Structure formats: C-alpha cells, structure tokens
Amino acid sequence: MLGSTHTLAHSMDLPLFETLELELDQHVATIWLNRPDKANSLNPAMWENLQSAFEWCDDTDAVRAVVLAARGKHFCAGLDLTMFAGDDLHSGVSDPAREAEAFRRNLLRLQENLTSMERCRKPVLACVHYTCIGGGIDMVCCADMRYCTEDAYFSVKEIEIGMVADVGTLQRLPGLIGEGAVRELAYTGRRMDAAEARELGFVNRVFADHDAMMAGVMEIARTIAGRSPLAIRGTKEMLLYSRDHSVADGLNYIAAWNAGMLSKIDLQAGLMAPRGEDPEYAD
C-alpha cells in the first residue's frame, strides 16, 4: 500500500510553485523552500505559495504526512525586507486610519498563509538546518514537530529591527517552550542553538547533518503514513482543539468525534494485523 504512491506521484499532476518544490512519495509530501539565493526569505510569492501548497496537501487524499524542508545553505532567513519598501504591506493612501486598516488586513493575510500549515489535517514535520530566524520561527511553530541539524540556530529577530513579532511566534511559542524562555528570546533577539532548542523541547531531535536529518525525519513520516489516515487526522484535530480549550471541552469533543468518525473498518484492520506489521488503510 505505502509503495503505491511512488507511481501515483508520476501519474498525478503535482502543482508547481514559483518559490517552492513539491514532491510526493509513499504517501509523504515534501515541501521544499526554494529561494536558496535569497536564504529562503519569505517574499510575497512564498507566503502565498505556502498556503496553496498546504491546502493542496490537505485536500489530496494520497498525502498522509508532510515534510517541510529547505534547499540551499539556510532554512529561512525570515521576512524578505523588500516587502517593507513596496506596497506589499502598505497601501500608500494618505489617510493614516485607512493606511492602518490596510496594513492590518495585509498582516492578517500573512498570518492566514502560515496558519494553513496548522490547519492542514495531515501532520507536518519541519526540518530545520542552519538559519531559522524571524518569519522562519513563525513558520515552524505551526508544524506538528520540529527537527534540526547540529548547526541550526533560532532567533526572534524582529526585536533587533524595532518591531514586534506579528505572524505567530509570540502566540504559539509559549506553548512549546515555556513563557520565561520565550520572553528572553523575544526581548533580546539572541540565538538559541540546537542543543538549547532540544533541551527546551522546541525540537524533537537534533541530527548531525542535513542528510541524516532528512533520512531520519522521512522514516518518522512514513511511520505516520502507515497508520490509519482517519485516526491520524482525528488525533491532530483533538490535539489542536485541546490546546485552546479546557480539558472538559476536549473530552466532550473527542466523545462526539469518535461517536461519528471511529472507523470500524480501520479498527478491525488494526486489531487483525500481524504483530509488527501495518495493515492497509484506505486514504
């Protein structure tokens, strides 16, 4: 079953993107940030491409897990600063109130671009190497799990250019590493290296180099892809819901969810499978 998508990927028309590469193999989609000459900084096209790519992964039944990685020397150097110079964030109108409204709407759109990763029903595994700063942290905070290389470092860089991080870091990071650590990183802009990121629980594992990381994370992604896709999607839904709601609300939601979407077919397949073997599940 898992090997079937290699052929499928060749027969399926995968979407093309200006700033990303998309691959599909063995039910695992890999989204590559692909502006290596610009340190994979987030320009307007990449913001929009990310949302389109993750919405495609969400909608495509053959995708059961998503790996986010990057081409070139850097993972992501944050926001492409040329966006501040043009009309990408500002409307150019003379009325300060209307200018502020336009800026707010543009900012909400950027937030939505990255939140599409969190909303994707399939688990997202982020692979970070070397540089991950500013908007790169906003991005990987939306992933289900994060992994990095020994040379990776993370920095909430916005404070160094006189602005408040505004696309998700300050909202999501405290739930991942604790408020005290977030405040220090956000107030100083200092680098958090791979060892500290692992110690704080921001990354699940640190790998020696990029090749080792990609091999290790792909193994995890394929393990996820071998589980019941419906059960995986439900598990992600429950974890996200429980993050933002009380325990009582979460318990009530899972009771309603399983009452309607516990698959007897998948459950029987899982119970009947030989020990150590994954059964075949429908997408």
Image (spheres, rainbow, N blue to C red):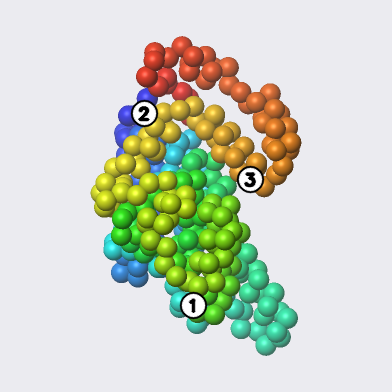
Name the mark nearer the viewer: 2 or 3: 3
The tag on residue 243 is 3
Tell me if label 2 and label 3 are in contact, CB under 8 Å. Answer: no
Residue at horizontal 57 percent and vertical 34 percent from the top: 235
Tell which circle, 3 or 1, labels the residue nearer the N-terminal end: 1
Q: Is residue 85 visible?
A: yes
Q: Is residue 162 left or right of residue 30?
A: right
Give the image location of residue 270, x and y in percent. Answer: 48, 18
Identify residue type, mark 1.
Answer: Glu
Q: Which mark is residue 160?
A: 1
Q: CA distance from mark 2 to mark 3?
A: 31 Å
Residue type, mark 2 in image: Leu
Crowding near pointer 2: few (<14 within 10 Å), some, many (20+)? some
- The 10 Å Cα crowd at callout 1, few under 14, some 14 to 19, many 20 or more, is some
Quadrant location of residue 276? Answer: top left
- Residue 172 image point, x, y percent: 58, 56
Q: Which is more toward the observer, 201 or 283? A: 201
Q: Which residue is mark 2?
A: 2
Determine whether label 1 and label 2 are within 8 Å by CB. Answer: no
> Disc 3 to disc 1, how far (Cα)?
30 Å
Q: Nearer the viewer, residue 200 or 225?
A: 200
Residue 14: x and y in percent read 39, 46
Q: Amino acid at mark 3?
A: Arg
Q: Residues within 10 Å of mark 3 (few under 14, many from 20)?
A: few
Q: Quick one: quadrant of the N terminus?
A: top left
Q: Secondary structure at mark 3?
A: helix
